[in-house]
Image: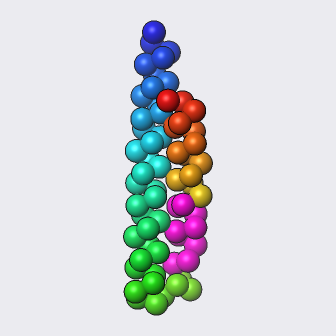
Amino acid sequence: MNKETNTNKKGKVLAVVSLILGLVSIEYTIMGFFLEILSSIIYVPIICSILAIILGILSFKAG
């Protein structure tokens, strides 16, 4: 029972981190679009979105 509780808790934490990274990715994309400074912050949304997708899949499997 304890292992199942830890797995469920881990899945929830991964899901929340995935959500936060997705929101950061969207924020940096919008900020770069409106401020037209894509050259300096183009890598942040790409990295955050890839990590968000990976963590979302892991949380679904842990879940």
Numbered-mark total: 0
User: Relative to 5, does residue 40 appear above or below in the rendering?
Assistant: below
Give x and y (percent) for residue 22. Answer: 46, 58
For the point 56% across and 52% down, the residue is: 53
Q: Is residue 19 magenta?
A: no
User: Who's the residue at 43% across and 19% down the image?
Assistant: 5
User: How was this image coloured?
Assistant: rainbow
- Residue 17 in the image, given as x and y percentages of width and height: 44, 47
Question: Measured from the top left, where is residue 57 in percent x and y?
Answer: 57, 42
* Residue furthest to the bottom: 36
Prevalent SS, magenta region: helix
Q: Is residue 42 magenta?
A: yes
Instruction: Give coordinates of residue 10: x percent, y percent.
Output: 47, 31
Quadrant of the image occupied by residue 16: top left
| Residue beneath the point at 48% across and 88% down | 37
Quadrant placement of the N terminus: top left
In this view, 1 is above or below 8: above
Against 1, residue 23 (above or below) is below
The residue lying at 53 percent from left, 69 percent from top is: 44
Drawn side of residue 58 relative to residue 20, left or right: right
Q: Where 28 falls versus 9 (above or below)?
A: below
The range drawn in magenta is 41-49
